[in-house]
Structures are given as C-alpha cells and as structure tokens.
Image (cartoon, grey):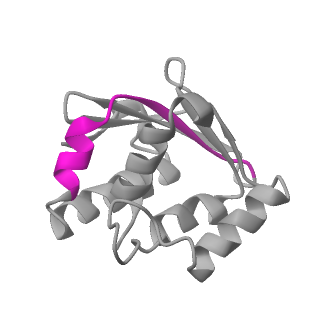
Amino acid sequence: MVTLDPAAESDAFAIVISELIRQNLADHPDKKRTLAAMRGRVALVAEDAGTTITLRFRDGQLTVHSGLHGVPDLVVRGPGEALIDLSRLPNHPRLPFLPDYRSPVARSLARALWERKLRIRGLSGHVQLFVRLGHVLSIH
C-alpha cells in the first residue's frame, strides 16, 4: 500500500514518512480504509532541512516521491518539527476520525499556524484530504 519511489530511496525525510505511515497502517488496520479513500497529492516542505517530498494517493496506494512530483493539491510547509508533530496529534475522544484539538500538540500546531511558521496552501478546496492525511499520519 505504501511505496517509496526509487528516486526517493536516499531521501531521509521520504524514508521516515513512508515508514511512519507503513507502521501506522500495520498498527491500526482501520486506517487502511482512510488511505483507500484518499485521492490527490500532498507536498510536505521541511523548510529548515531544505527538503520536499510529495505524497501521491491513488487507488488505495501511496507513493512517496522526493521533491515536487506533479502539481500538489495541498502544500504543507514549515519546520520539520511541525511536520512531524502532525503524526503526534491524538484522536478526538468521541470523533476518532478528527484530531483532539485540545491536546498540547494541537495547540503547538495552532500556534505555528498563527505565527505563520506552518503554512498550508490548498486547504480550502481539500479539507477532506487534509483531515485524512492527519488520520493516516497519526500514530494514535
């Protein structure tokens, strides 16, 4: 379900994200349905590390590419720590498909958004893709 593009095999960020999602799918089989419903491309830009990866979701498959690959529907850019924090968002206690916005991690991400350290382009047209991305990335 998760493949690493051959050109990304030497990209540490691409490897970390692909392994994180693989492990999440193994630990939480319900996330496979979320992945199956995802369509589109998401670029993650770790500005402090100077690296970009593209996650391409199609037909229940995820391919992780190094750099920009095609035209992304969403671009999430900011410090690498904030991008990794997306994987630490806990699920909402009553609505497990949504993150718990009261958690310290959520507050930290909200602060990064408010301070414009973390920016998301394309969110208005792709909210569902972003919510599903959060669910697939979350280790919870």
Q: Residue furthest top?
A: 70
Residue 134, placed above or below residue 107: above
Residue 111 as seen in the image, left or right of residue 69: right
Quadrant, the N terminus: top left
**Picture coordinates of residue 24, whole percent (x, y):** 27, 64
Q: Residue furthest front?
A: 94
* Residue 15 appears in view: no
**Picture coordinates of residue 40, whole percent (x, y):** 40, 27
**Picture coordinates of residue 18, whole percent (x, y):** 35, 51
Quadrant, the C terminus: bottom left
Q: Residue at x 39, y 65 (%)?
A: 138
Count of residue discs: 0
In reply to whether residue 40 is colored magenta, the answer given is: yes
Q: Residue at x 20, y 39 (%)?
A: 36
Residue 133, placed above or below residue 93: above
Residue 122, placed above or below residue 82: above
Q: Residue furthest bottom?
A: 104
Q: Residue at x 61, y 33 (%)?
A: 124
**Stretch in magenta:** 31-47
Residue 114, placed above or below residue 33: below
Residue 112 as seen in the image, left or right of residue 13: right
* Residue 24 appears in view: yes
Q: Quadrant of residue 136?
A: bottom left
Q: Residue at x 34, y 74 (%)?
A: 94
In reply to whether residue 34 is colored magenta, the answer given is: yes
**Picture coordinates of residue 19, whole percent (x, y):** 32, 58
